[in-house]
Amino acid sequence: MTTTREAALHGLLDAAVAGRVSSWSPPPGDAEWARGLELWASVLTQRWRAPLPPPPAGDPEAGWLQYAAALWSASGDPGRDSGALLARLGESALPDPGTPLGRFAGYLLVEATMAHARLDLAASIADRLGPRVWASVGHPFGAAVAVCRARLLAFRGDIAAAGAVVAGIPPPTEPLLAALVAATSALVRGNDADATEVRRLVATVDAIGAPEGHLAVGAHLLAAYGEVALQDTSAAARRVLLAGGDEQLSRLNVVDRALALEALVSFAVAHGDLDAAETWADQIAPLLASPIADSTAARALSRVALLAGRADEAVAWGERALARAGEVDRVIEHAEAEIVLNRARLEHPGHSSADAVRALRAMVAAAEERGHGMARRAAARELRAAGLRLPPLAGSGWAGLSEREADVARLVAAGLSNHAVAQALHVSDHTVRAHLSRVLAAFGVATRSALPAAVRAGPPGPARLARDRLTSRQRDVAALVADGLRNAEIAARLALSERTVERHVSDVLGRAGLPNRVALARAWLAG
C-alpha cells in the first residue's frame, strides 16, 4: 500500500509543480489517503478552512496527512479559535520521519504551524523529527521542502543559516520551483541588505507571470517580503495586491494577509497618505482577534497612529506587537516591532529618546550577530527622521562617518588634542568627544593612538550613487537635493507633501549607506 500511496502523492506533487492542481483528482481506491490528499490540494488552491475529518482508525499514515493538511487549511480562519487544532501537537507521537510518507507528513506539520505564525512550535517539531524530516522526498518538490526549512530559519532571525540552506538547493528546472527558490533567496538577501541581488532574483519570480496556486502566490509573497526588507514598499505593495487576488486579499491565509496588509499600510505611511493608511488599517484591524495575526496587525496600527499624531496610541500598539512577537518566537517581527515601538517613543513626551536609542542599538547588535543586516538600516532610517543616529558599524571606516566626524578623524589622526580640534572646528570639547567616540567605533580601534594607522590610507573619493537602485521619484528627489533645494522647495517642485519628501530623502540615504544630505549631493554629482 505504501508504494501505491507514494505514487498517489507524487501525482499531486507533479500537479503542484506544474501549476495544475485545480484539474487534479486522486486515484480511485484508498479513500482515507485520498481524503488527506484532497485536503492538501485545497491548501494548494487557496481554499481555506476545510473541516478536519475524524481520524481513521489504525491508519497513522493517512491520519497524519489529514491532520497536517487540515491544520494548514485552518490557517485561513481569522477567529480566536483558529489554533484549536494545534493542541494535538502536545502529544508525544509525531509522524515517523524514517519513511517517505511520514517524512512528508512531518514537513506538512512544519508548514502548517508556520502558517499559524507559531514559529516556536514549528521549530520544536523540526527538532523533534530531526534532520530526516528535511531528507529527500524523491521528487523535485523537495526544493519546496528545503525552502520551508530556509523560511523557518529566516523568520526566526537566523538569516545566515537560512542563506546557507538556500545556497545548498540544487537549481530546479521547473519554473514554479525556480521562482520559489529565487523568491526565498530574495527574502534572505533583502534581510541581509543586498539590494542588487534582490532585484536580480525578483526578475526570476516575475518571469512566471500572474500568480495562480500555492507555489506561485508564495513566490510572489516571499519576493514582496524581500522588497519590504529593502524598504521598496512601492514594489512590494503592487506585488502583494497581485498575489492577494483582490483588494480584500482573499486568496491569502491569515498570516500572509496580515503581512501583506502591513506592507500596504507601510507604503501609505511612507508617502504620508493618512487616508490610504487608515483604509488599509480598517482591513487589518479585525485580524487583531486572531492569534495568527495579532502582532502584525498591532504593528501596522502603531504606524498609522504615529502618522496621525497619536503617539500614546502608537506606543500602546507597538508594545502589544513586541510582546506577542516575543511570545511565539517571531524574531524578525520582534525586531520590526522594536523599531516601530521605539520610533513611537521618540515622539512621545513621556518616554526618553535616550532609552529608545539604546533599545534600538541593542536590537541591531543582536540582529547583526544573526546576519540580519537590514535591521541596522531600518533602525537608522527611523532615528534619522527624529534627528538621531545609531553608532557606526565597527570597521565601516570613512563610510560610517558624517562630514564633521570625518574632519575630527583627520585632525585627531594628525595629532591634535581634543581641545585643539574643538578650536579648529569652532565646536565644544564635549562635541569633539562625542564625534571621536563614533570615529573610533567606525575604524574599530579603542584609542586615539591607534587611529593614525587605521586612517593612513586616507579618505576615499566621493561615493557614487547607484541610480538604477532608486525609484524614479527617489531619483527626482536626489537630483533636487544635489541642486541645493530644501525639503519644502522640493515638495513644491514635485507637488508632494514635505513629509513625503523627508521619507524619500531618508530612504535614499538608507539605501546608499550615506550619512547626510551633503554626502547624498556629492554622491549624486559624482554620478
Image (spheres, grey):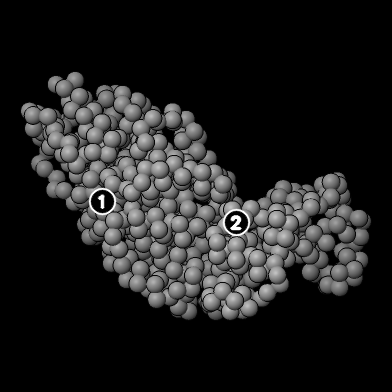
Q: Which residue bears the numbered disc 1?
A: 75
Percent across and percent down for residue 374 are 55, 52
Q: Which residue is mark 2?
A: 511
- Number of marks in the rendered image: 2
Q: Residues within 10 Å of mark 1 (few under 14, many from 20)?
A: many
Q: Position of residue 216 (x, y in %)?
A: 33, 44
**Residue 99 visible within the image:** yes
Please, what is the three-letter code of the amino acid marked with disc 1? Answer: Ser
Quarter in which the N terminus is drawn: top left
Q: Is residue 426 left or right of residue 42?
A: right
- Classify mark 1: helix, strand or loop: helix
Judge by depth and name the residue closer to the eye, 285 or 245.
245
Residue 372 shown left or right of residue 64 in the figure: right
**What x and y, as percent, mark residue 70?**
19, 44
Kind of element beneath mark 2: helix
Q: Looking at the picture, does residue 413 appear above or below residue 521?
A: above
- Which residue occupies 48% across, 79% down? 309
Q: Residue at x 66, y 76 (%)?
A: 486
The nearer-to-camera label among 2 and 1 is 2
